[in-house]
Image (cartoon, rainbow, N blue to C red):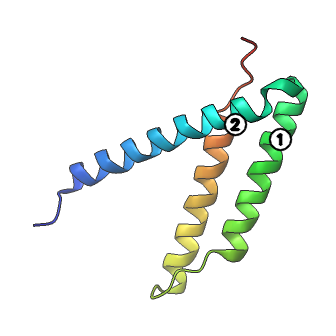
Amino acid sequence: MAPDRNELQAINTAWQIAIQEILRMVIRDMYHAGGETEFKTHIKRIEEAAVESIRTDLRLRGTDEWTEVLVKERASNFVTTLLTSFSYDRA
């Protein structure tokens, strides 16, 4: 029996939160020492590279063009939302 829509949404949301928190800790630890300006520069570079990679390199086998475009757009939006949510923690 397939999971119902609410369960799939809960799984998807939990996955997004988990990935966001892992990335937040990794990025904070990697780029904190350089100061806030350098931190923001690194975040912007990561965002731009990830979005470019999604748009040019993501290949979805067995899907139609519309689905592929939709997935790429949503993935790109997710990257931007995720990375712009990070802030420099002075602590």
Q: Is residue 60 above or below residue 85?
A: below
In the current view of this chain or complex, which residue is farthest to the left?
1
Q: Quadrant of residue 58?
A: bottom right
Q: Which mark is residue 42?
A: 1
Q: Which residue is mark 2?
A: 27
Q: Is residue 16 above or below residue 64?
A: above
Q: Position of residue 31 (x, y in %)?
A: 79, 33
Q: Amino acid at mark 2?
A: Ile
Marks 1 and 2: which is nearer the front? Answer: 2
Q: Are marks 1 and 2 in contact (CB under 8 Å)?
A: yes
Q: Please give left or right for residue 34 compared with residue 12 in the image.
A: right
Q: Give the CA distance from mark 1 to mark 2.
A: 9 Å
Q: Please give left or right for residue 86 compared with residue 3 in the image.
A: right
Q: Position of residue 85 (x, y in %)?
A: 64, 33
Secondary structure beneath dot 2 equals helix
Q: Quadrant of residue 2?
A: bottom left
